[in-house]
Image (cartoon, grey):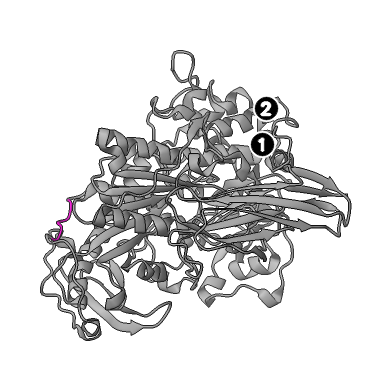
Amino acid sequence: MKAEEINLRKTLVVAISAAALSACATTGVSQPSPAAIEEAALDLSGWNSEDVLFGKPYFDIDEWREAPVRHRYVHGGFEGTDTRFSYYFPPADQYEGRFFQHVTPVPGSENAAQEAPVDENNKIGSSIDGGAYFVETNGGGRIDLTKGSNALADPTITAYRANAASAQFSRLVAGQVYGTNKRPFGYIYGGSGGAYRTIGSVENTQGVWDGAVPYVPGSLMAIPNMFTVRMQALRVLRDKFPGIIDAVEPGGSGDPYAHLNEYEASVLKEIELMGFPMESWFGYRMMGLHGFAALYGGVAMADPTYFTDFWTKPGYLGHDRPELFEEDRIQFSTTIAEPITALEAHRLGLSDDPFASAQPGNVDTAFKGTNEEAKRVVGFRLSDTPPPKYLLGGELVVSSGSATGERIALNTLQGDVVMLGVVNPQMVAQVAAGDAVMVDNSNFLAMETYHRHQVPGPDYPVWDQFRDGAGKPIYPQRPMIIGPIFVQSTSGSKMNGKVDEKMIIAASLWDREAMPWQADWYRRRVEAYHGAEATDNVRLYYTNHALHGDALPEQMAESPARIVNYVPVLQQALRDVAAWVEKGVVPPSSTQYEIVEGQVVTPENAAQRKGIQPTVQLSVDGGERVEVGVGEPVTFTGVVTVPPGTGAIVSVRWDFEGSGSFATGSPVPDKVQEITVSATHSYDTPGIYFPALEGVSQREGDKETPYARIAELGRVRVVVK
């Protein structure tokens, strides 16, 4: 193994494979008396772990709690480690012999679920509603991404070992809580980086979990390429997004290239062919660096000569077309005037939005947090103001003072203030007023086309645009392809698809962090492993109008009228995979789709699309767009349909203004699989509106439960003159 590969592995969050953990031998579950759970005392003496690191568990909390629903809460950890776990056991009459275990994108807190809002996304409530106790861990301990190779001594712990040990130990505890020696079934799920760790967990163990639901997953080539291609588009097209968005909105021209020059069109086509969902550009202001802020250091360590080669060698855009960067390249020397704390940044209205200018904040809503958080340095005011240029990612190169030679990651430049990226606070603390610095974004500009120099094998057709007629790369290639190294260091897995457990993959069609084709890529690997029996082991459900994040639409700083919450799909997928494993109940068919030039395309008809999300078809005065005068009524007609075998419609709501406020409902009969609704509305103010119709289905047709309510939208355009 090359030395640079070894160094990169040390830099990343979580890690390579380790020995598989043993499984409990018995299966099934018996129902204890309701009083058993109230009285059971917990005993550690029965624990026997094949992973010696986790040989000494302990408890420090064992109590009944009433929120978000009644449960017995058990907290503890393993002596000699940083691993902590939380178990949430329902009353005996709600327990059906299984657990659900959530895996976070990076190791975090074992208390996250209990600190979350009590809403339809709540993991404790939805798990107990699904007959399961809930398991969460801190993944082996928090990792400081700013410490590079010292981030974690043994990254296999956070990849899967801490979660596996906690899952296995939970079975011993559950047996005592419920008074049974029957082995609970177990199901693991996680999204984004948590999807990598979920996949790595089942690929690297046997018998720990019985099924898995990875969601919004990436591929081996996701990192850093899905971010670099987006960074390029964000910069080059920053003034053209309104026209691009309007073209792909309902009733638009359908041609997002119409108003672009040749170079701009080539940049948009490059990211479209890489799989970016074009409808998702509506959120361009909120995209930013995202995960790349934490990845840049690993790339720089793995391939340090790239940044010089980009500007100096033929075949690289910085050398071949330097004029394309003249407007935005910054190499500005100055000195530090003063640090900017989190509190001051809030009061000044500073943000990480490269498209926004600073606006004074309201002192009544000033930074709320601990004193330590308020005093954290998040930026620097410079002694001189750099020329007004776009900056999304850069470095503050320090050339005097205690931090001489350090390169501090930046997110944005706002006037005379630079906002910091993922940084080491101890190193930032060494920077003082008067220190000489340079604001330099050369390396981040170079990263925008890094994916061109990382062309993988033919199983990644989105890279065909960078191959010649003979299938050879048209651009110079770097000494190694680093994506698989990042992924394996995160999950301990090569994503080979060798999964014996039942698996349901969930992905979002509007995902701009994990391009949607990547879920298909992994599904094909699982299918290749299982061969003719593949459909007996894996499903893939796509959710339309859903993004990468799993917060409720109204909690996101983006238009809730455009997006739906995909968490109900996860809730149903967990229940489906449990029924598949425990009772042999075959889940609904995978979403039907085809991939056309990087884009995942699904049928509009529910019977043809399949999957588990309903379809909504909406028209206004018979079409997708209408122009009317103020006060002139228009008629909306919508058809909501559930795919075969996926339940019934439980809610239909209108949002006539397109604001995300679905306040007007239409009555829905019980147990219907298709419904046609209509409404008439008029507008008092001129403007362009995008009314929406939301249709919601639920497997049992339960109109009261907050869980597993799967939504879809239909949208149209109304122009009021």
Q: Position of residue 361 (x, y in %)?
A: 71, 68
The answer to whether 115 is drawn above or below residue 418 in the figure is: below
Residue 199 against residue 29 in the figure, above or below: above
Query: Residue 50 appears at what percent x and percent y?
Result: 12, 59
Mark 2 or 1, nearer chain start:
1
As measured in the structure, the alpha-carbon distance from the residue carrying label 2 to the one carrying label 1 is 9 Å
Prevailing SS of the magenta stretch: loop
- The magenta span reads 20-24
Label 2 belongs to which residue?
A: 263
Say which residue label 1 marks: 236
Crowding around mark 2 (Cα neighbors within 10 Å: few <14, some 14 to 19, many 20+) is: few
Q: Which residue is at 15% across, 78% downward?
A: 43
Q: Quadrant of the N terminus?
A: top left
Q: Secondary structure at mark 1?
A: helix
Q: Secondary structure at mark 2?
A: helix
State which quadrant residue 98 falls in. Answer: bottom left
Q: Amino acid at mark 2?
A: Tyr
